[in-house]
Each structure stands twice: as C-alpha cells, then as structure tokens.
Image (tube, rainbow, N blue to C red):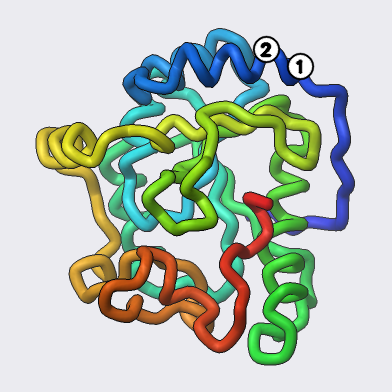
Amino acid sequence: METITTVNIRRTPALNATEIEKLNTQYETAHPCEIITWAQQNFGHNLALTTSFSDTLLIDLALKVDPDLEVIFLDTGYHFSQTLQTLRQAQKRYRINLRVIRPQPPAADLWAADTDQCCNQRKVEPLNQALADKTAWLSGLRRTDSPQRAHTPIIEQDRRGLIKINPLAAWPEKDLTEYWEQNNILTNPLTAEGYSSIGCWPCTERPAENEDLRSGRWTSSNKTECGIHL
C-alpha cells in the first residue's frame, strides 16, 4: 500500500469545453461500455478507475473493456469491515490491477471535529496523488444519487484539469438493474441493511425515509460531498 504527500495537479485539459460539450451530446444515451471504450481508446494507460467498493458495477463494466485498467481504492482507515470484505471478494472474482492508497501518517483523527479537513487528508489529497500521473479517470457518479448530482455530465473537466468520465451518470435504472442481475454484481453487505451510500463508518448512517440515497452521509452537518467530486 502507498502513503501520500500533498500534491497539487493542474494540467492543460486534454479536451476543450466545446469538445466536451459535443461528447456529452454524443454519449448521453450510450451504454456505459461504449463510454468506457471511448475513454480507453483516447487515454489508454493514462486512464484510471476509482471505487469505494459499495459494489463492483463499474469495475465489472470497465474490466470487460480493459482488463488491465488501474483501479484505485482510497483506504481512509475508517472503512466498514463489510467494505473491505467486498474488496476481497472482488479480488477473488476479477483480476484487478488494484492500487490501494493510504493517507500520509499521521493523518489526524478529525472526523468529529472537522469533517472537511478529515476528508481532505484521507480522501482528497490521496486521490490527488493517485491521479498525479493520469490524464483521465472513471467515477461511478449517478444523477439519481442526490439532488447535488442531478446534472452530472457524462464527461467533464475536474478542478485538477483532468478529464473525468462518469459512465453510469445517465444509465436508466431499468437497464442498470437488468445488467446487475444478469452479471451477478457484487454488493456491499451493508446495502441489504439499508445503507444506500457507504463511506467511512463515523460519517455514514442509513438514510431517512423518503430522503435521497446519500442523505445518510455526514448527518450532523450540511456537508453533502467529501470533496473528491467537487
């Protein structure tokens, strides 16, 4: 496993705004594998996938396109045991080119006092390091996750200057469910216990009834994102 130090990434984007807009129009209704294929053909070994092991849907799709794709997991030190169990199950099922990254010790124990800084030390900075040699990355964001993610584009430029691809963003629920069942996608056991969004154990609860899927995260504050997708 790797430890990290602070790194700032700011690159000239591989695509300009006009190109990104055209690509979003082109791939709005595309199957995720088609989107991932475009990403692999354009970025090759400069592409990576990030996962929190809530499930293996994006991994399953992506490895069908590129079995050697680098998969990044941020080990915050606060994952549920069920999340690590899902990781181990995924390693048994797939031949994953897995890169596990931990924060630079001693990362402060800040989750109770300063959740923003805690997330920055344990997720944001580690991801910056993991993507330091990449041009683009795949994430599992979906528009149905929360109101804040309702307008997630398929392809965007992130604040690092990297191209971020969200293959699942617009995938219809019916098609997703059908693929999930047909391919027996691994699911974090906490999902069956009512957890619809799974992060670090100190800041994750079951969502309230009739609330969005991520409403169980950081319930003691107005925080809605850890920072890696901002």
Q: What residue appears at the point 35 percent right and 21 percent down from the top-left corner?
A: 29
In the rendered structure, find residue 19 and report the number of the disc placed on it. 2
Residue type (three-letter) at the residue carrying disc 2: Glu
Element marked by disc 2: helix
**Rendered image quadrant of residue 10:** top right
- Could you tell me residue 190's position as x and y percent? 28, 70
> In this figure, which residue is indicated by the disc labeled 1?
16
Q: Is residue 209 visible?
A: yes
Q: Secondary structure at mark 1?
A: loop
Badge 1 vs badge 2, beta-carbon distance below 8 Å: yes
- Answer yes or no: is residue 70 visible: no
For the point 64% across and 30% down, the residue is 156
Image location (x, y in percent) of residue 89: 29, 53
Instruction: Give the numbered dot on residue 152.
Output: none
Residue 81 in the image: x percent, y percent? 38, 73
Q: Quadrant of residue 155?
A: top right
Residue 36, placed above or below residue 175: above
